[in-house]
Each structure stands twice: as structure tokens, then as C-alpha cells.
Image (cartoon, helix red, strand yellow):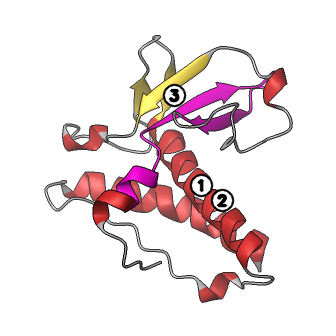
């Protein structure tokens, strides 16, 4: 999606931190640092049943400093909990794609997924492993999105 808004206005609308919540079944749920009452949570109705063990991971990306990342890499949160890096990044992308699709559905009646072209940009200073890792995370999400929306 292209916009004519200045970059500072775009960035002001993007979440700065995504928190991971584990429900009783072990399923991950996401909310942003800017959400009050979990407004941006992926599962709006069941947030009250979530456990309070949040795995907070800042997405001001670790990939700037990680030179040997793969789909088997793990990330450690401030509270010591570990999670698969590919899951963290793919679920974060899924959150943003889902949030965009929900907003799009409220504006337009029907939008076919073939009408949307997703572009994931990464910093030029990232090495090829980091770029490939992000590509893998995006493909993991977008294949599921296309199946659901078509």
C-alpha cells in the first residue's frame, strides 16, 4: 500500500512494541504497547482469560546485530523466556497483515487478496541471512493469508 503521508505521521501510527501473551492452551496472542485494554489484540474477546505471563519483544529489530540467524534461532525476552525467532517475526507480520485486512474490510465491502501486493522492505545493511530470514517469515504468513481470503 502506498501513501502520501509524511514518514513521521506513518511511524507515529505504528506500534513500537509487540507483546506476546500465552493463553491457557499455549496459543500465542499479540497486543501492542499502544493498545489500551488490548484493543489491537488478535483475539479481542478472550483477552481476559490470558495468563499474565507476557513475553515482550521489541521489534526494533535484532537483525541489525545478528549475523547468524536461521529458522531454528531463538530469542530471549527480558523475563528469560525463549521463543523461536521465525515464529516471533512471522506472527508479528501476521499481526500487521491481519490488522490491515480488518481495517480494509471495514472500509470496502469486498477486496480480493489478489488485488493486494505486499512488499516487505528491509535495511540495506542487513546481511543475506537476515534478508532471507525475513523473506521466509513473510512467505510463511502470506501463504496462509491468501488461502483464507480467496
**Mark 2 vs 1: CB contact within 8 A:** yes
Q: Earlier in the sequence, mark 2 or mark 3?
A: 3
**Mark 2 vs 3: CB contact within 8 A:** no
The answer to if 24 sits in the magenta stretch is yes
Graded by Cα atoms within 10 Å as few (under 14), some (14 to 19) or many (20 or more), the crowding at tag 2 reads some
Residue carrying label 1: 94
**Res. 98 mark:** 2
Q: Residue at x 49, y 25 (%)?
A: 56
Q: Which residues are magenta?
A: 10-32
Front position in the image: 5 or 133: 5
Graded by Cα atoms within 10 Å as few (under 14), some (14 to 19) or many (20 or more), the crowding at tag 3 reads some
- State the separation of the CA atoms marked 1 and 3: 16 Å
Q: Residue at x 47, y 44 (%)?
A: 15
Spot the residue most to the top: 79
Residue carrying label 3: 83
The correct choice, above or below, for 102 with respect to 114 in the image is above
Front position in the image: 150 or 2: 2
The answer to if 87 sits in the magenta stretch is no
Q: Residue at x 40, y 35 (%)?
A: 73
Left or right, residue 91 beside residue 124 = right
Q: Percent position (x, y) of residue 38?
A: 68, 34
Front position in the image: 60 or 8: 8
- Badge 3 marks a residue whose secondary structure is strand
- State the separation of the CA atoms marked 2 and 3: 21 Å
Q: Earlier in the sequence, mark 1 or mark 3?
A: 3
**For the C terminus, which image quadrant?**
bottom right
- State the separation of the CA atoms marked 2 and 1: 6 Å
Amino acid at each position: 500500500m502506498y501513501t502520501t503521508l509524511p514518514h513521521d505521521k506513518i511511524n507515529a501510527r505504528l506500534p513500537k512494541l509487540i507483546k506476546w501473551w500465552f493463553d491457557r492452551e499455549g496459543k500465542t496472542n499479540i497486543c501492542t504497547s499502544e493498545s489500551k485494554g488490548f484493543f489491537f489484540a488478535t483475539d479481542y474477546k478472550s483477552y481476559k482469560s490470558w495468563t499474565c505471563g507476557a513475553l515482550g519483544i521489541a521489534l526494533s529489530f535484532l537483525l541489525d546485530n545478528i549475523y547468524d540467524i536461521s529458522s531454528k534461532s531463538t530469542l530471549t525476552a527480558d523475563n528469560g523466556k525463549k521463543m523461536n525467532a521465525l515464529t516471533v517475526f512471522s506472527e508479528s507480520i501476521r499481526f500487521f497483515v491481519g490488522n490491515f485486512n480488518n481495517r480494509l474490510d471495514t472500509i470496502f465491502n469486498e477486496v480480493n487478496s489478489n488485488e493486494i501486493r505486499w512488499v516487505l522492505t528491509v535495511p540495506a545493511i542487513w546481511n543475506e541471512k537476515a534478508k532471507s530470514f525475513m523473506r521466509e517469515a513473510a512467505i510463511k504468513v502470506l501463504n496462509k493469508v491468501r488461502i483464507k481470503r480467496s
